Amino acid sequence: MNFKEMDVIVTSQWLKENMESLYEGIFVAAEGFVDDEFNTFSADDLKEMKQGFTAALTVSNVGGKWKLATYINDDTTPWFYDDLETYPNDEIKALMLLE
């Protein structure tokens, strides 16, 4: 599969339909943030997030490895910084078709 460097903003609906594994992972992380006493992410934030959110996705080649950084809403720190190849091929293809 051909990868390309890109920065895109997608909705939670797009993620749910096209990158379900990332979508589900975001909510697993969010629930963990709520339970973490040192995190400022609250149960109200989670409730609001369930109504919809945006994600900025950055694909980049870092040292010969393709990475996907995922930023939620206006966060400046990525929630995830994963090897792109850990996602199913159909999800990667959907992402690569953007832009």
Image (cartoon, grey):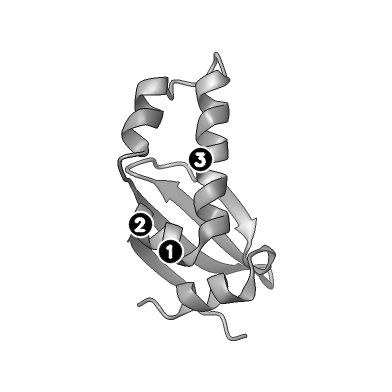
| Residue at 54% across, 48% down | 24
Kindly identify which residue carries mark 2. Answer: 13
Using the image, tell me which numbered label, if any, was put on residue 58.
none
Question: Crowdedness of circle 3 by 10 Å Cα count: few (<14), some, many (20+)?
Answer: some
Question: Between disc 2 and disc 3, whose residue precedes?
Answer: 2
**Is residue 82 placed above or below 8 in the rendered structure?**
above
| Residue at 43% across, 81% down | 97
**Is residue 3 placed above or below 77 in the rendered structure?**
below
Question: Crowdedness of circle 2 by 10 Å Cα count: few (<14), some, many (20+)?
Answer: some
Marks 2/3: CA–CA distance: 13 Å
- Taking the view exactly as shown, the residue that stands out farthest to the bottom is 2
Kindly identify which residue carries mark 3. Answer: 27
The reply, left or right, for residue 97 in relation to residue 11 is right
- Taking the view exactly as shown, the residue that stands out farthest to the top is 37
Q: Secondary structure at mark 3?
A: helix
| Residue at 43% across, 48% down | 71
Where residue 50 sits in the image (x, y, percent)? Answer: 37, 38
Kindly identify which residue carries mark 1. Answer: 17
Q: Amino acid at mark 3?
A: Phe
Q: Quadrant of residue 51?
A: top left
Q: Amino acid at mark 1?
A: Glu
Q: Amino acid at mark 2?
A: Gln
Count up the numbered dots.
3
Marks 3/1: CA–CA distance: 15 Å
Q: Nearer the viewer, residue 47 or 75?
A: 47
Cβ–Cβ under 8 Å for marks 1 and 2: yes
Q: For the N terminus, give its image quadrant.
A: bottom right
Q: For the C terminus, give its image quadrant.
A: bottom left
Cβ–Cβ under 8 Å for marks 2 and 3: no
**Is residue 94 placed above or below 1 in the rendered structure?**
above
Question: Crowdedness of circle 1 by 10 Å Cα count: few (<14), some, many (20+)?
Answer: few
Q: Secondary structure at mark 1?
A: helix
